[in-house]
Amino acid sequence: MTTERGSDETGVTTTRKTFAILETLKEEEGLSIAEITRRTSLTKSTVYRHLATLTDMGYVIERDGEYYVGLRLLEIGETTRNRNAGYTAAMRKVFELGQETDERSLFLIEEEYDGVYLHRYGNLSDTMIGKRRPLHSLASGKVILAEWDDAEVDRYIEVKGLERHTQNTITDRDALFEELERVREQGYAVNDEEYMEGLFGVAVPVHTPDDELLGALGLFGPTSRFRDEYVHDALVDRLRDKAGEIKVTLAYG
């Protein structure tokens, strides 16, 4: 049996422990070494060593015996968000959508079969950036799934499953494939309280000038307000316009 000290010397294990601590701090900042130890099941000495290194490098800060994620990580995240010209163009359109419709807007991309919020406008926008969500239960996620062939969608189901979040969540493979065919035919997707009760969403795909999928542009709000012509006409038209503007921006600068 390998001792913790011995395994701690291996690069992969050490890295996993570092990120376990960062993930713990991300979920609830302001934790003591004892609390981090309890939540990660690492030894106190291991947590202390990793925190010392992270603090020295600026990725974690310590205040009165409690530890917080440092702003150095924000710098890395912003580099990721700005590495693609399309992501920058999408950020402007998300802001415009929110301002023009007075609804919450978003731009979602896919990474490792998760939907990741890259930009959001509305309540608590900054706290949602980088959050991961299941593709099959979001309008923006279904837009992305609809771009894939059947084999890739099956791979998504195999890897991530079709977890139920509300009574409206699609949890059956055949039902999901029917929904994705509908999305392909109409060119947009909706989320009728499929991830959270009381919320309705609508989204369209965003393509590059080479017709590669860049991500999904969406709007969401209370189910009571997102109904009929407002969604299927007004909001879809607005989303398509913005998606087209992103494509033109990438083509002509």
Image: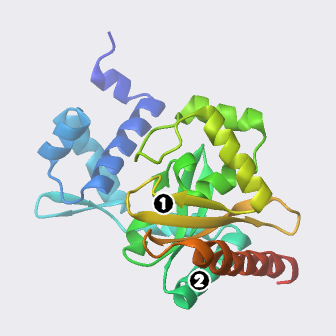
Residue closest to the eye, 8 or 148: 148
SS class, disc 1: loop
Look at 76% across and 61% down and name the residue there.
186
- Give the Cα distance between marks 2 and 1: 20 Å
Position of residue 149 in the picture relative to residue 153 (left or right): right
Residue for badge 2: 97
Total number of numbered labels? 2
Could you say where residue 51 lies in the image, as x and y percent from the top left?
A: 27, 49
Position of residue 232 in the picture relative to residue 118 (left or right): right
In the image, farthest residue toward the front: 228
In the image, farthest residue toward the top: 1
In the image, farthest residue toward the bottom: 100
Look at 71% across and 79% down and name the residue there.
237
Of labels 2 and 1, the one closer to you: 2
Residue closest to the eye, 168 or 18: 168
Quarter of the image with the C terminus in it: bottom right
Type of the residue with mark 2? Leu
Look at 65% across and 81% down and name the residue there.
234
> Which numbered disc covers residue 130?
1
Could you say where residue 242 lies in the image, as x and y percent from the top left?
A: 71, 80
> Which numbered disc covers residue 121?
none
Residue closest to the eye, 11 or 210: 210
Could you say where residue 22 lies in the image, as x and y percent from the top left?
A: 34, 50
Instruction: Report which quarter residue 246 is drawn in.
Output: bottom right
Q: Earlier in the sequence, mark 2 or mark 1?
A: 2
Position of residue 222 in the picture relative to residue 158 (left or right): left
Mark 2 crowd level (few <14, some 14–19, many ≥20, 10 Å Cα): many
Look at 38% across and 63% down and name the residue there.
198
SS class, disc 2: helix
Position of residue 144 in the picture relative to residue 52 (left or right): right
Type of the residue with mark 1? Gly
Position of 235 relative to 167 (above/below): below
